[in-house]
Amino acid sequence: MHIKTSNTQQAARQAMAAKERQRFITGHPQSQALAEQAAPHWLFGVPLHWMSDWSTPFALQVASAQGAHLLDADGLDYVDFCLGDTGAMFGHAPPALVAAVQREVARGCTTMLSGEDVAWVGAELARRFGLAVWQSALSASDANRFLLRWVRAATGRKKLLVFNGCYHGTVDDVFVDLVDGVPTPRSSLLGQVHDLTAHTVVVEFNNLAALEAALKGGDIACVLAEPVMTNIGMVLPQPGFWQAAQGLIRQHGALLVLDETHTFSSGPGGYARLHGLQPDALVLGKPMAGGLPCAVYGMSAELAARATQAKRAAPPGHSGIGTTLTANRLTLAAMRATLAEVATPAAFEHMIARCTEVADGLRACIARHQLPWCVTQVGARCEFQLGPTPPQNGTQAEALFDAELEHLIHLALLNRGVLITPFHNMLLCSPATSPGDVQRLLAAFDEVLGQFNRDCSVGFEMMASSTA
């Protein structure tokens, strides 16, 4: 489905957005001053250009973050449902993590040598996620990139299969989309000089026939996927999809690599463990060390043996896998604290309960304002999407995007003390998220939708699209 708005509605949207931008400017003089000071020496005025992708007229400047709340440079408090886009999934500055980091900093942050936390963390990763052998990285992007090297070396195959609209960090290989059914390098990827379609195959999520056809050539090293697509907007697997897909992948000699950086929100062992999936490898990223640069990737014993053999058979020299700060002492200590004391079953029970309250409340608010939208939930993560039914693949999910409307909603929520993820409409609950925080979100959401209906005379005409 897609939304069509009249010229009058479009003008009303823009007028409402202008009011919200002015409200932000008026309420954030210190943020504006700090943003102007930073502008001359940072590209786009920020140390990471993503920070300029928010809907604000200038970058919001954060003074501190604690639990499920942020305090900005102007002394304004926000309830945080973005949580560093999952990096702070277990809340900002949990005491056990703070203590571990403070203790380890005094002992030295990095030595490029192993230490006392390594054995415990490895055993706990194996216990929780069901894969025998692990390695560390500094980000999920690195972990995915490194795993692709191991898998290609172990299998002798070069091709990768991904699902249309996927996101696995900054791994060049994955930036291939279906455009009118034709695999095409993503146009937003800057500076790419190689033809990515030579070694990357892309099919739609939930399409078993397309997956089987792509695998039949016998040249796919692995399928790299999130068990639930999250970055194009949430796309849930259809009943039986993954069970059948795993059979096809193994039948044709490929491997299954699951990226659970976001779907770790499903429970203490992630989505795969909760739903009985059996990947050959697994990636876990930014929440593993409370937001410190850290990721891990696990392998089955069989894949680990093949990877080990490939490494030992290769000539000496750099493998293209690893960086100097990978597996530093600080992140290992933080990961141990996270796994032992923060990301506990009790924490997940709380997070998921709060998120269910959020999802139910959003649905009720959307129904009250008679909007043709839906809400999707995966554990402690949920998202409202601008269509009446959840999408089944990346093409359908992308068709629901309305960047102008989403930016307006995000900015209006921010002006009412609520932060959600800027890149789409995702909300995440942490162990620190309280029932009061949920009510604050729902009250703000209700106010914003009410204002939107009054100012913009919402009367969407829903039209069937031809998305597959």
Image (tube, helix red, strand yellow):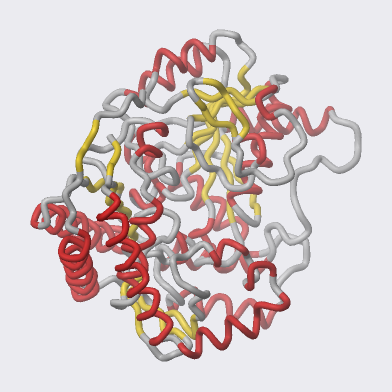
Please name the residue shown 55% across and 66% down the image.
52
Q: Nearer the viewer, residue 77 or 91?
A: 77
Which quarter of the image is occupied by the N terminus?
top left
Identify the residue at horizontal 35%, vertical 67% (top origin).
Answer: 17
Residue 377 seen in this snapshot: no
Q: Is residue 126 above or below residue 242?
A: below
Q: Position of residue 21 (x, y in %)?
A: 39, 74
Looking at the image, residue 442 sits to the left or right of residue 306; the answer is: left
Q: Position of residue 93 (x, y in %)?
A: 46, 77
**What residue is shown at x 33% (from left), y 59% (from top)?**
427
Between 373 and 234, the one nearer to me in the picture: 373
Question: Residue drawn 20% across and 46% down?
Answer: 460
Q: Nearer the viewer, residue 55 or 324?
A: 55
Looking at the rendering, which quadrant does residue 239 occupy?
A: top left
205 on left or right of 35: left
For the residue pair 433 and 1, the one nearer the viewer reads as 1
**Apparent side of residue 122 relative to residue 383 in the rendered image (left or right):** right
Residue furthest right as drawn:
316
The number of discs equals 0
Q: Is residue 123 above or below residue 306?
A: below
- Does residue 75 sit above or below 78 in this rendering? below
Rendering coords of residue 468 (x, y %) = 36, 23
Q: Position of residue 215 (x, y in %)?
A: 54, 14
Give the answer, above or below, for where 355 lies relative to 391: below
Residue furthest out toward the front? 7
Q: Residue furthest left?
A: 368
Q: Is residue 405 visible?
A: yes
Residue 49 picture quarter: bottom right
